[in-house]
């Protein structure tokens, strides 16, 4: 058995686009800052939420007001821009700002669905496009610019093949090519980035069509996987592909049963290429190549307790109390970035899961799970740290949500993206649920940015940079940030006037959503910092984990004192004058949740009280 950590990853049965959760009324209207509430949504058939009047608005702080500008560059009734992780939908190459998104001007069926695209090389933007770029129905565009000046968009022609649009230079006419796959039921949900020594290689990952999206009976797997993440490479700007449909060693059926849509990311810088996979009920990991995709090394950042977990055949009961355990995992929405020093940074939203019924082909999640987790390549499995949470704006110790939130199946702090400034500063954007703006039944998500000026060792407080704060309210979702930060941070996001989605989840009535290009000056002041350096490389273990009544702590040179804090930082236990290498502590009276444990010599760990 592997050691359990407070985060676990990827659900192995693939979730189809039609999957929606059932709404359940919540007993409490406010949620403790400990963030974890006993509210479960079962993943099964669902119902839409009634719309209501806007309640009185609590002023929300733009913590660091700076110069910002926004343009509505596009629109779409089709509002599902991603199932989980956000794609690279915006490029800033110094002279050109380009954006792409999935677009449709129909309110159902979406037969006109395709790539919406808008770009500019001046200060103003062209009119909103009303036609897709392709002649066929597509979705999920990845936008990239090569060093040669070539512009490329890769998307899927669901459910059969991938489609590539390209043009030699900005302003030229687009050409279209089909990227064929040997997957028997097609290939979907691609991610593509530019890399290579000359900046003209294309690295791409995509998912072979999982059972939930197949048309034939019986359904088929690809190399034994129900949805295989496959790797593609072109070293000549997409003219030819010298690697295609490859399941990399370490990503195959020996380790996984399948993969979920959009639960992955890819980035490249020079010869280094990194793939991240964000899972729910299996290991979450990186695949790293230092030679432009020829050879790969796997590194796990969350080590799941059970190998090849199937869900319906077994229940995870780690402490032997005959009760299924809840596990803290990723929400499948993560981000990946290689900085100028060639260090790899990884982010994901936390999520709490429960699978307590055998044979029902379903699992549950806790929609108010909070926390944006951060990890660097080389830190080792489990050594991540939460660097931001939903903001308690009025400081009353609770998150004052009116009732519910839009259903993206994500954390309260989800959809992260990472970028780098010219001085090496790191910028992280995400869509966070905010307590100050809501309809009568659901709180909105706002656009937040946090910043690190020391390579990820410390991070600023969360800054709500949502424009138009005087407006009654709108939902910010799927923010995609340009990798290059110059004088400004450049972001494309979807603006909706109702929390949640119409395509899945909430099943709200279809409405026209704005695609907004937003830029804000990069001088976001680091006022308060969250340190992560002391939480890495701990020589301390806690068993059992999760635990009910007591824990045994073992550490090198365990002498002096121990303190335990809840997730908000409040000290809930201290022990002094320890003289042995291990000690046992009674935790039976602690509320359920995640706790941080620190010894006097600086070792840090965390555990879950059930």
Image (cartoon, rainbow, N blue to C red):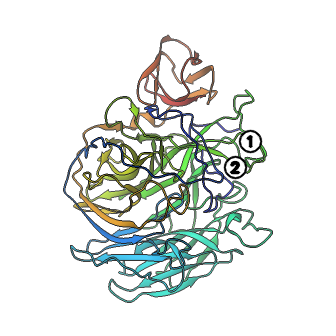
Point 42% across, 76% down: residue: 116
Relative depth, front residue between 297 and 486: 486
| SS for callout 2 | loop
Q: What residue is disc 2 on? A: 362
In the figure, is residue 295 to the left or right of 431? right
In the figure, is residue 107 to the left or right of 248? left
The quarter of the picture where the N terminus appears is top right
Image quadrant assignment for residue 133: bottom left
Point 42% across, 30% down: residue: 568
Point 57% across, 73% down: residue: 232
Q: CA distance from mark 1 to mark 2?
A: 8 Å
Relative depth, front residue between 430 and 48: 48
* Residues at marks 1 and 2 touching, judged by CB atoms closer than 8 Å: yes
Measured from the top left, where is residue 385 in percent x and y?
A: 45, 39
Measured from the top left, where is residue 393 in percent x and y?
A: 32, 37
Image quadrant assignment for residue 398: top left
Q: What residue is disc 1 on? A: 357
- Closer to the chain start, of discs 1 and 2, is 1
Measured from the top left, where is residue 224 in percent x and y?
A: 75, 63
Image quadrant assignment for residue 419: bottom left
Q: Is residue 404 visible?
A: yes
User: How many numbered discs, if any?
Assistant: 2
| SS for callout 1 | loop
- Tell me the crowding category of disc 2: few under 14, some 14 to 19, or many 20 or more residues within 10 angstroms, Cα based: some
- Tell me the crowding category of disc 1: few under 14, some 14 to 19, or many 20 or more residues within 10 angstroms, Cα based: some
């Amino acid at each position: 058995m592997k050691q359990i950590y407070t985060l676990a990853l990827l659900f192995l049965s693939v979730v189809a686009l039609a999957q929606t959760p059932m709404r359940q009324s919540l007993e409490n209207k406010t949620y403790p800052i400990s963030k974890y509430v006993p509210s479960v949504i079962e993943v099964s058939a669902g119902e839409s939420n009634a719309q209501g009047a806007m309640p009185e608005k609590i002023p929300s702080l733009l913590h660091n007001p700076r110069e910002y500008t926004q343009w509505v560059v596009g629109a779409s009734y089709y509002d599902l821009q991603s199932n989980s992780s956000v794609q690279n939908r915006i490029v800033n190459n110094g002279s050109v700002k380009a954006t792409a998104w999935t677009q449709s001007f129909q309110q159902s069926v979406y037969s006109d669905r395709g790539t919406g695209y808008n770009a500019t090389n001046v200060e103003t933007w062209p009119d909103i496009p009303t036609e897709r770029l392709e002649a066929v129905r597509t979705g999920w565009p990845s936008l990239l610019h090569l060093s040669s000046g070539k512009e490329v968009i890769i998307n899927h022609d669901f459910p059969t093949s991938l489609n590539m649009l390209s043009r030699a230079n900005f302003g030229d006419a687009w050409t279209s090519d089909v990227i064929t796959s040997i997957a028997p039921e097609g290939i979907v949900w691609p991610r593509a980035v530019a890399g290579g020594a000359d900046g003209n290689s294309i690295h791409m990952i995509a998912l072979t069509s999982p059972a939930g999206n197949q048309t034939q009976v019986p359904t088929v797997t690809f190399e034994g996987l129900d949805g295989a993440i496959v790797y593609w490479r072109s070293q000549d700007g997409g003219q030819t592909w010298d690697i295609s449909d490859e399941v990399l060693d370490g990503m195959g059926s020996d380790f996984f049963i399948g993969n979920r849509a959009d639960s992955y990311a890819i980035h490249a810088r020079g010869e280094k290429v990194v793939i991240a996979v964000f899972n729910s009920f299996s290991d979450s990991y990186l695949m790293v190549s230092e030679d432009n995709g020829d050879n790969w090394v796997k590194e796990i950042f969350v080590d799941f307790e059970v190998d090849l977990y199937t869900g319906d055949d077994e229940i995870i009961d780690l402490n032997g109390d005959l009760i299924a355990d809840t596990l803290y995992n990723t929400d499948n929405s993560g981000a990946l970035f290689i900085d100028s020093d060639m260090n790899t940074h990884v982010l994901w939203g936390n999520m709490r899961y429960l699978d307590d019924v055998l044979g029902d082909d379903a699992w549950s999640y806790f929609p108010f799970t909070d926390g944006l987790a951060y990890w660097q390549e080389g830190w080792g499995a489990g050594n991540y740290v939460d660097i931001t949470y939903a903001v308690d704006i009025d400081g009353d110790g609770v998150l004052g949500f009116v009732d519910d939130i839009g259903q993206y199946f994500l954390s309260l702090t989800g959809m992260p993206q990472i970028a780098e400034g010219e001085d090496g500063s790191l910028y992280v954007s995400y869509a966070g649920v905010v307590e100050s703006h809501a309809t009568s039944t659901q709180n909105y998500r706002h656009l937040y940015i946090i910043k690190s000026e020391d390579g990820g060792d410390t991070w600023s407080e969360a800054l709500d940079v949502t424009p138009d704060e005087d407006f009654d309210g709108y939902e910010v979702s799927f923010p995609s940030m340009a990798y290059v930060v110059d004088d400004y941070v450049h972001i494309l996001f979807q603006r909706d006037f109702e929390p949640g989605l119409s395509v899945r989840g909430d099943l709200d009535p279809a409405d026209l959503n704005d695609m907004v290009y937003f830029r804000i000056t990069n001088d976001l002041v680091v006022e308060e910092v969250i340190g992560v350096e002391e939480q890495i490389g701990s020589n301390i273990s806690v068993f059992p984990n999760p635990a009910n009544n007591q824990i045994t702590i073992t550490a090198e040179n365990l002498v002096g004192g121990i303190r335990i804090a809840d997730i908000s930082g409040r000290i809930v236990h201290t022990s002094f004058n320890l003289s042995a290498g291990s000690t046992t502590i009674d935790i039976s009276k602690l509320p359920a949740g995640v706790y941080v444990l620190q010894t006097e010599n600086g070792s840090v760990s965390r555990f879950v009280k059930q």
